[in-house]
Image (tube, grey):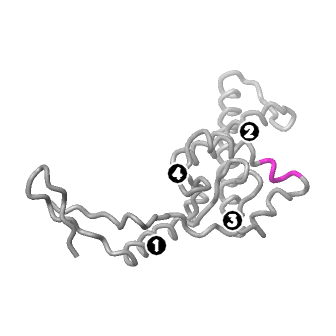
Amino acid sequence: MTRRRPPDDVSESLIGHYAGAVTRLVAFVVDSVIVLGLYQLGVFTFIWLVHVFTGNSINEERNLWFLIPLYVWQFTYYWYCYALSGRTPGKAFFGLRVVRGDGRDLRGGRAALRVLTFPLGWLGFGLGFIGIVIGRHRRGIYDVIADTAVVYDFDARAAHLRFLVRHPVIELEPATSATDPPVRTQ
C-alpha cells in the first residue's frame, strides 16, 4: 500500500484571497432579502392563522413586538449558516466563506460572537466597515473582535491545487515487515 504525504518542511494554507467590499456588500444584500422575505412570509402566515382561528385581525405596524422575532430570526439565520458551513446562501452564491483568522473553520461560539458584534459596524455612520475597504485583511470591526475573515472559497481550492502542483508528493513504499519504517522513493 502506498501512502502519500507532503514534505515536512512545507506548511499548507487553504486560505483564499480576502473578499472585497463590493462582493461582501452584494452578498449581504442577497442575505437581507432572504431574511426579510422569509420573515414577512412567517408574519403573514401567523396573522392569517390568527384571523382564521380567532376572527381577530392584527395590525403589525402598530405592534413593536414584531421586531423581537425579527432579531431572533436574523441571529438564528446567520449563526446557523456560519456555524454549519461558514457561509450563508448569499455568500455561497458569490463563492465567499467566513473562516477564523488563521483559516480554520468557524465554530458555533465564534459564529455567535461575529453575529452579535456585527451591529458595531454601523456605529459612527458605518465606520466599523472601513477596514473592509482599506484594510489589508479586509476585516470589519466585528471580524477583528471575533477573529474572523471572509475569503473567496473557490480561491482556497485553487490554492490547494497550486500547492499540490508546486510540491511533489512523496510516495512511500510499504515496509517489508511490521518493524521496518517505510522507504522513501523518488
The amino acid type, in three-letter code, at marker 1 is Ala
The amino acid type, in three-letter code, at marker 4 is Asp
Residue 84, given in percent of the width and then of the height, sits at 52, 45
Q: Which of 37 and 47 is in front in this view?
A: 37
Q: Which quadrant, please, contains the C terminus?
A: bottom left
Residue located 80% across and 53% down the image: 121
Q: Name the residue under label 3.
A: 137
Boundaries of the magenta span: 119-123
Residue located 63% across and 60% down the image: 150
Q: Name the residue under label 1.
A: 158
Residue located 69% across and 45% down the image: 115
Q: Name the residue under label 4.
A: 105
What is the quadrant of residue 151 in the picture? bottom right
Secondary structure at numbered mark 1 = helix
Secondary structure at numbered mark 2 = helix
Q: Mark 2 points at which residue?
A: 71
Query: In this rendering, which labeled residue sits more in front, label 3 or label 2?
Result: 3
**Contact flag, marks 3 and 2 (Cβ < 8 Å):** no
45 above or below 8?
above
